[in-house]
Amino acid sequence: MNTKTGNMENVIQTHPAHPDIHRDDTASKLGMWLFIFSELLLFGGLFIVYSVYRYMNHVAFDLAHRELSVTVGLINTIILLISSATVAMSITAIQKNDKKASLIFLSATILLAVIFLINKYFEWGSKFEHGMYPGSDLMGMLSNGDMLFFSLYFFMTGLHAVHILIGLGLLSASLIKIRKNKIRSDKYSLLENSGLYWHLVDLIWIFLFPLFYLIH
Amino acid sequence: MENKHLPNYLEYQGKYKGLMGWLTTTDHKRIGLLYFYSMFSFFLVGATLGILMRLELIAPGKQLMEAQTYNALFTLHGLTMIFLFVIPGVAAVFGNFFLPIMLGAKDVAFPKLNLLSWYLYILGALIVLSSQFMGDGPPDTGWTFYAPYSLKTQTNVVAAVFGAFVLGFSSILTGLNFITTMHRLRAPGMGWKRMPIFAWTLYATGWIQILATPIVGITLLMIAAERLLGIGFFDPAIGGDPILYQHLFWTYSHPAVYIMILPAMGVISEIIPTFSRKPIFGYTALIISSMAIAFVGYFVWGHHMFTSGMSDSSRWIFSFLSFIVAIPSAVKVFNWTATLYKGSIRLQTPFWWAMGFIFVFMIGGFSGLVIGSLATDIHVHDTYFVVAHFHYIVFGGTGFAFFAAMHYWWPKIYGRMYNTKIANVGLAIFFSGFNILYFPMFILGLRGMPRRYYDYLPQFTDGNVISTIGSWIMITGLLILIVNLAKAKKMTGKAVDDPWDGSTLEWKIQSPPTLENFEEIPVITGGPYEYKDR
């Protein structure tokens, strides 16, 4: 459970003694899972709000969702699903001590994440061009139901995009550490946890996509 | 102790000296004290605000301040006390300091994350407090930020809700850290059923922190988005539903009550066996009741909204579920009293605090049943009865347990014993002041005095005068307690390793503990409450 510390006198002299000598990959994975539960509940609150307002304004929600392009949403869904697969492959590669493959798969994941964001940029951009953005005059003129739909759309996909950015940060940090050999076949918990986080980001999109783009 | 030559955690010199040594520490004990001193400062700020409010209410009409100032004051009092003191409260201070020691570990699972949590706490606190000085004046919504008023008021609500969001983040990370610590760092031989009850209550608390806090986090973000970007979520004028805001807010904020009270109950569960010289009665029942409180606590939030406009069936279901929570709480009280039965009780200061806790907690609990039942709630909702109830639970419960923990563990934290006679006198004054301050509020509430108002009708004057006098008595007791403990810190005397003959692991090591608590990880061979002198 605890790594043997060796010469105690030496350890006492150099600070900070304990966090560096103590390493517990199971603990960091458990911690990540707990954090993911928390993240799920964060979006859970929004899903409740969505359901309540959809129930109250189902006609408006149905009409408003036709404004969104299913194709763009579908492309983004496929991108995220593939990226989830590539990050998993990157983890397997590092477990098998194949640094090169791990780097390739991880770079692919990062690339896909960037493509997702570019898509999102154009998707949001076209709405902004038509004057559709939170706080705009056009939004103010919409009916209550339409306004709620687009408010939730911007808020939820926006929050999801923030999570993509955090995930990108984690994945990039892992990439650098693999290159510096700080993530190796015997020490890959950062990559594994970034992967877990990335799956969460993917999972949330899997719910956002039907809620906004598909349900009639 | 053979390892006396090792420096304790207070003397220990790391990479940095002095203040920097504290601000960069990853030692759970130092982080616990960082929390303690920052939190206690905020507590004193909150208490001062409370005293000022009581002064304003000593007579009808204007005494000290304008109505708007009063609104800002009670908002800040609530924000400070709830978010900066009682929610992190016992868990962040004493949980940080003692959980690893009680488990036989050298630190929490994620020491750096632990330090980050403290920085987030400080950041959140600064943002909340900055709302007082920036923008268009201090928020006047009350700590609940009810929509639509929180969307309409001109005051600086955004800073306050964003600060609360950051504080929530800090709380989540602490809970996550503690749960992982308990899963991974129990000493060899310490099975789950050999953990001290305090650790178990932190375990239950950790789950609430992880699973409930994000709900309020997202709700507060929505308030901020609605104010900043004009996104419509809760404003009825643009289709939003203010009742939905209340639902989301209380979905967290009721479980938050259990974040406050569960570790407090854990402290009491440590003190009572130590001073009764008996293993705690119903160890398993105490664990189950903690988990039950954490679980059922999720499904009772609606009792804050009995008069907000809910269907009759939701109201009786929430009322029924609220009564269910009373069962595990009562199980705890019965177990504590059963532990006293036939114990060889030592009437020492921490024990008196525990008794004080049980007394005020029972008054708070029973008054909770009054407002948990639909018919009586309609009568006393939003009156001073509710104010009295939650001060008995939150201050009387968590606050008393916080002081109990201070008096129980102070000798371990600083290796110095305080003057117990002065501590007992201080407690007696504090306890009397507490009851004189809050008990009249029950009567005022029953007679119909509404809460949160700046002014009141002349017939409520007597009760308010008594209450204000109580606040002076209580603050006198508080000052005596603080000075007494502060003096103990400076006293030069022999360090005491085990002043109470405790049986949990923190009493087996030196006071103050060394940097790594245990030079050798202990092997556990028995339960947490086995006393040799029995």
Image: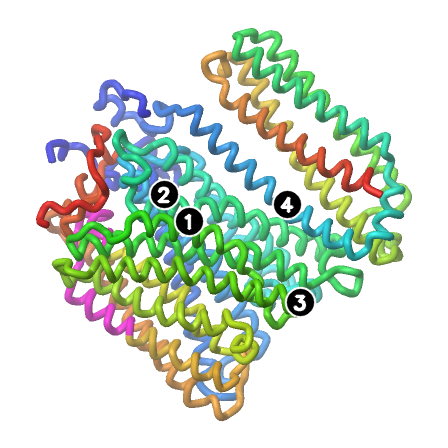
Amino acid at pointer 3: Ser
Residue at the spot of label 1: B291
Residue B356 placed where, x, y %? 28, 67
Foreground residue, B493 or B331? B331
Foreground residue, A182 or B66? A182
Report the residue at 66% width, 23% height from top. Answer: A84
Residue furthest bottom as drawn: B459
Tell me if I can see residue B19 in this picture. no
Point out the tag, 1 or 3, that comes first from the N-terminus.
1
Report the residue at 40% width, 86% height from top. Answer: B465
| Quadrant showing the N terminus of chain B | top left
Point out the tag, 2 or 3, that comes first from the N-terminus.
2
Amino acid at pointer 1: Met
Magenta segment: B408-431
In the image, is residue B91 above or below residue A34? below
Q: Is the magenta stretch mostly helix, strand or loop?
A: helix
Residue at the spot of label 3: B311
Residue furthest right as drawn: A130
Residue at the spot of label 4: A44
Residue furthest left as drawn: B533
Q: What element carries label 2?
A: helix
Amino acid at pointer 4: Gly
